[in-house]
Image (cartoon, grey):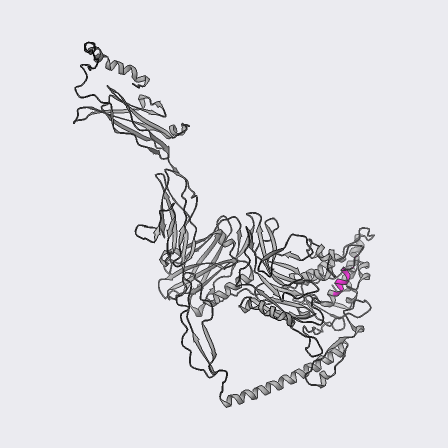
Amino acid sequence: METPPFFGLALMLLLLPDLLAGTGALRGNDNGETLPESIPSAPGTLPHFLQEPDDAYIIKSNPIVLRCRAVPAMQIFFKCNGEWVHQNEHVSEESMDESTGLKVREAYINVTRQQVEDFHGPEDYWCQCVAWSHLGTSKSRKASVRIAYLRKNFEQDPQGREVPIEGMIVLHCRPPEGVPAAEVEWLKNEEPVDAEQDENIDTRADHNLIIRQARLSDSGNYTCMAANIVAKRRSLSATVVVYVDGGWEVWSEWSVCSPECEHMRIRECSAPPPRNGGKFCEGPSQESENCTEGLCIQDIENATDIALYSGLGAAVIAVAVIVVGVTLYRRSQSEYGVDVIDSSALTGGFQTFNFKTVRQGNSLLLNSSMQPDLTVSRTYSGPICLQDPIDKELMTESSLFNPLTDIKVKVQSSFMVSLGVTERSEYHGKTHSGTFPHDSNRTFHPIHAKNKAAYIQNLSSLSKRSEMRATGIFGHLGGRLGIPNTGVSLLIPHGAIPEEASWEIYLAINQDEASLQPEGSEVLLGPQVTCGPPDVTVSTPFALTIPHCAEANSEHWNVHLKKKKLQGKWEEVMSVEEETTSCYCLLDPYACHILLDSFGTYALTGEPLSDCSVKELKVAVFGCMSCNSLDYSLRVYCIDNTPCAFQEVISDETHQGGQLLEEPKLLHFKGNTFSLQISVLDIPPFLWRIKPFTACQEVPFSRVWRSNQQPLHCAFSLERYTPATTQLSCKICVRQVKGHEQILQIQTSILENEKETIAFFAHDDSNFPAQMGPQAFKIPYSIRQRICATFDTPSTKGKDWQMLAQKNSINRNLSYFATQRSPSAVILDLWEARHQHDGDLDSLACALEEIGRTQPKNSNLTETQIEESNFSYSRQNGL
């Protein structure tokens, strides 16, 4: 019989009278089975529990109560973790079971949070009841006592999805850790999701929400709710957008034949129409063709007028050509000193002619005794930095500045400085032509016959959008080729193409093919660019400029140049920080300038080296009216900060009728794995309302980080209460969780005739995709030649091409330039590529001035002498 130590003595005193009274009876029974006379007549039983203690959870600091009831029971005590609870901590009550007449005893104790926290056993804190009767003891079940809690953070939040209609949606949710384990409930737009009422939804699998076939009505904001007896927790909302890609219906019938002998047909993107950001139909919405099989007879009077105007136009053109030809001939004789080999250019109508430059008058020869070629006028922006003549050795060793002694500088009010001879300071000479005349005497071939098929095949595989490619015919004089508004350009130096050859060069952005799939953590930093034809051989490296979206920092990024091989595979050409003589990469804040000797398809990839790596995103918002006259759609784009990516968005939005509502802003997106949140704020409450599931949208990190293949955008649907509302004002908030934030203020009229126009992005050269000859370069050719002659020659003072590179912020991989025939020329080509938009000749002139002022280590000139010479030189040149 198990008894607690404090209860043993009391129990013996309680049973002593009965034991003494029954002694004779026990002694008189041979079998010893007789019971004491004082035992009740009811058959004896062990205690039976009517109520056993239940498992319990302590919430915050509130103690819990454990109860038990037993019959028949003389006493009830609790034992916790194997030790008896003191009787002072018990509360007991006794009653009579009316049906049996037996005693019913009930006891309960309190268990505090401190008791549970102080227990450090191998199992949970537990308690059980022990009840006594005349025949022995009975034990209840063990009841565990645990401290209840629920963590704040979900182990996995649901992530937003964009899925096509009838696609499967799986939203994962792992609730916070808790005791007891949390129950999970899903909300859609703050309303509970009832999976029992919708057979298309299943919420039973590991707390996940599964929508088997997505419907438009399934779009919305989904939230995972976790709750136990302690608290409730909400996950981050996941926005699900079910979109519909547009589809063409059948073509309409051909229209009647027009007076221009054409008919047309149309089709609409309405089977189905795109919805919720779905793709618009690809291809044209109308077609036209000749309806008379090429034979078109129009009114005779109109034909006569056309013939008359054509004849007059031809006559005017003929007279203009003759005048231009005579003018060019006279100027070539008087100013350039050329010998006309074929005089039939003047007497034989419109035949072209060749010319050669007389050596005595050739201004390109670097001889200080000859007169410089000053017929080319160039305009320089900003104050010009001229060479200081204190370095006598540099001045006598080369003709870089000696031929320029007759130049005077005139500073105008607009800070424009013009270069001209002293006697004719206001005269602006003509610029050299960028193209050669074509005739039978000159070898002219846009492309060799053996290369033509490959060239056509390459062009056919490029982007079909004309604004994403450019072509031009280039010769020995070189030139510049750029794709407008994309930041992609190609510089072909003077002399890169043989003197008796011309090539049709093309440059394109591979917009419709995403063949390069970065491996591991690598991401594309800019467009894939193709230049060609691929088998053209150049004698001097050309410069290819590709924009990028990385915040250039060698501590955070490892940037690679990759090239596509003939088999479609990509290989790494070099790392930007690598030392190599095969090519050269110069990474500027917004573009990479690459010196190459072979055409092909190239791309820039970046490998982030830390969570601090940053991609720069351009945030832009567009708006347009929806099919419903009361609806207005806002589309927010977060795209790589490259001109070509934004140009693609502009093209798509123009096709859809969208309008840019605010000047785009820059967002620094960190590689810290945190998502992007886009929300619409401050909508006028009594004029507009926003549909619930588009109020706030979240985009996963990986989709933003690798968004260069497809423009990333979120659509918001607004509705005005009445047609009288014509103005919209709100804010668009774009922020990275634990990162950068941008606010775009929208203030616009939704009426077509009252919309304000915000200028799209445009480069300075947007109207000149191809420039041939001298006008393509910022540095005049004669000055360029003198710079090369000066710095290609080693100097005892170190004033050579290496110093020229250093003064132009080129400090690494100098071994590449050492392998070139003229290192200075290649450095200047790189300068031309970097300064194609600003033409900052001032910086180059200042660099040359700094080199000229560099003194030898053993110079005997004092600082006073240097200052006096500088002052004297400035006075002589009118500065």
**Between 332 and 758, which is closer to the camera in this rendering?**
332
Question: As displayed, is residue 558 above or below residue 232?
Answer: below
Residue at the location (45% across, 82% down)?
258
Relative image position of residue 325 (x, y in whole percent): 69, 81
Q: How many marks?
A: 0
Say if residue 804 shows up in the picture: no
Q: Quadrant of residue 684?
A: bottom left
In-image side of 61 versus 603 (left or right): left
Give residue 437's position: percent from left, percent from top.
68, 77
Q: Is residue 670 magenta?
A: no
Please provide percent x and percent y for residue 450. Answer: 64, 70
Q: Position of residue 877 (x, y in %)?
A: 76, 64
Q: Is residue 651 left or right of residue 552?
A: left
Residue at the (69%, 82%) spot, across then down: 351
Residue at the front extreme, as displayed: 31
Q: Which residues are magenta?
A: 785-794
Residue 830 sits in quarter: bottom right
